[in-house]
Image (cartoon, coloured by chain):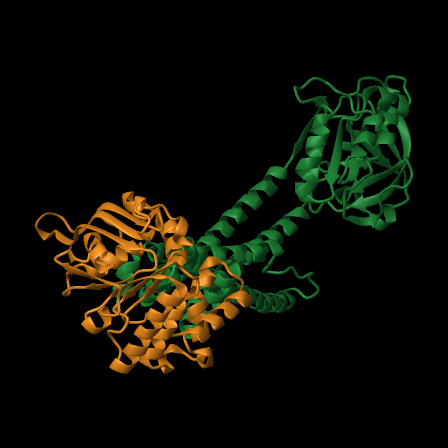
Amino acid sequence: MRPTDTFGLALQNLRRTRLRTTLSALGVAIGTAAVVALISAGQGFQSIAVARASTFGSLTGITVAAESDGGRPLPIRPATVQSLAAIPHVANIATVLQMPPLRLQVGAHALDLPTRAQSPITQGPFLAGTAPASADGIVIPGSVARSLGETPGALVGRAVTLTAGGTVCCTTTRDSLTLIGPDRTFPAQIAGVYNDGNSQVGSSAMLTSTELGATIVGSFSGSTASQYIDHQGYSTVLVQADDARQTATVAAAIKRQGYRVSDRADLLAQVHLVFNIITAGLAAIGSIALLVAAIGIANTMIMTVLERTREIGIMKALGAEPGSIRWLFLFESAMVGILGGVVGIFLAVGATLIGNAGFAKFVQSQDPGNAIANLFIVSPVLVAAGMAMAIGISLVGGAIPSRRAVRLQPLDALRYE
Amino acid sequence: MSSTAPQSTLSADPFRPPVSVSLNGVTRAYGLGLSRVVALDRVTVEIFDGEFVAVMGPSGSGKSTLLNVIGALDRPSEGRVSVEGRDIATLDAREAARYRRRSVGFIFQSFNLLPRLTVLENVALPLMFEGVSSGERKSRAARVLSDVGLAERLNARPATLSGGEKQRVAIARALVNDPPVLLADEPTGNLDSRSAASVLALILELNQARGQTVILITHDAQVASHASRTIQMRDGRVVTGDKDNVDAAH
């Protein structure tokens, strides 16, 4: 029997029982719509959460230490920094140099402050001024301005003196370097004042460029800034991926260069995991509807086989092969599945469009100007999977009835009234 | 087409026609133990090519079982059934379907037409199962329908036909694949005498014009009188008309 004839006969049979076909297909449609809509919601939640999480610096940041994975010293020289910058999905690179505390002298006032040398300076937000444009520029915390009794704006552009050496002391910061030797002074100017909230003076670091930092530290061993960095390398490098979803890839690429890295990409993996679990849970709930639809199809098709027992007997007596009979009923089931799947996907897409519009309105009312993400995401893969599920579940539902039809003995079927 | 069919041991006799259907020690029993019912009891029959055989006997004598076994609708419990030289007792479901489609045509007492299909579609059904294209199906079915005198009713539904017309459609359906053997189970049983006469005339004509072997079950001695031979059955056994009587009949 030709497939087109099987198809035609199946279609004819479906048309014969239009109401029943419609109801069975409706069951599949509702099941498919439920699964597709719920999974699209799960994927939407996930996408929103990941997008939000991705903007957190802590999730995109990778700290590269100047040592191997095994803990052996491995300097990070300027050439290394350039090779790191060439890694795909690296958005920013900041070099950091470990510094001793420095004494900041502004006019008659002097304060010993923990210091950090970093290029470029990414600390913010600024109360006044900007990140330094020149190598001698420094950024001081707002708490220093307060203790000096001056407004941040008045301090910007002010020439200051930085002092390093054995007498500068005792601002108990971790990780600080101790320099032994006579005090040396270096001219600098305040380029910006950053907001450190209500911190106590001395708890927030003064920031210099790595170049100025290297000049200061190098002077104690009689080397210039570039000599110092070429020889010692940077203490750490902060690499930022352009997207939290790329953090792990970038970190792995840096690791391949031999460095020990630390990142929080695992946090994003956790976010993904949580939402995958939620999506799976939603899909499972939706699947109940599909299961009911499959039972509905099985029930309908069993009725159909029963009703057509005599007809099946006649067809077998006239020489219909078992395979033809099986496919006749499987085609019928599959067509119910296709019909239900198409309607169900339209239902789901319609519902999610309405849902997304409503969600957008809600977000606007809460936070005008917010970039609105979609609450439901119906991907082409989801549509295809929904369709495949609808057809698959219909074939499962049709399997038992079609087997019954195949197994009918022609004589028994012919005698059936 | 059956002139090349293998013949029984009697084939040494040049005056015997070739064997079309042969049953050898065929038993068909249903159930087990005390509830065992023997529908056919060691039946041995030979039917020759082009013969018109009437099968008679009281109800329950095994006539229909005999026909069903020959048509591969039923399977013998024991014995050998050979049609056109082919052993059909051992066919699997698929081979049996092919055999029914190509080698036998069934005509039932209750017509067994599919009510939702047109006359033409009903007749074309065996061709559809054979995988014949839609166009060829239609032309072949229409030709056979015109042979049975129903050229005008191609698109009618079975329900709108008279009993005689329905049986003509069924005969057309049985003939559409041009099978060598026609099996008719009381084809005139549900018809009034006029229709019965014309249906019988049609079957006789087919037997003579096309040379098809016809095995026909009937209760009607009048009908049986048209047959070249009558097989009488009782309690699952052939009482008269088996091959030993053929020489006398010829």
Q: Position of residue A335 (x, y in %)?
A: 48, 63
Q: Nearer the viewer, residue A395 or B47?
A: B47
Is A141 or B116 nearer to us in this picture? B116
Residue A359's spot in the image, x, y percent?
59, 65
Image quarter in which the C terminus of chain A is found: bottom left
Chain (green): A
When the figure is inspected, residue A61 is found, relative to residue B106, above or below; the finding is above
Q: Residue at x 73, y 36 (%)?
A: A202
| Residue A24 is at least partly visible in this image | yes
Give the residue at x 46% y 75%. Answer: B146
**Residue A40's spot in the image, x, y percent?**
56, 57
> Left or right: B217 with respect to A281?
left
Corner quadrant of residue B184 = bottom left
Q: Residue at x 87, y 49 (%)?
A: A154
Q: Nearer the viewer, residue A40 or B124?
A: B124
Res. A332 visible in picture: no
> In the image, which lettered chain appears orange?
B
For residue B163, above or below residue A255:
below
Picture quadrant where residue B157 is located: bottom left
From this view, report whether residue A117 is shown above or below residue A132. Answer: above
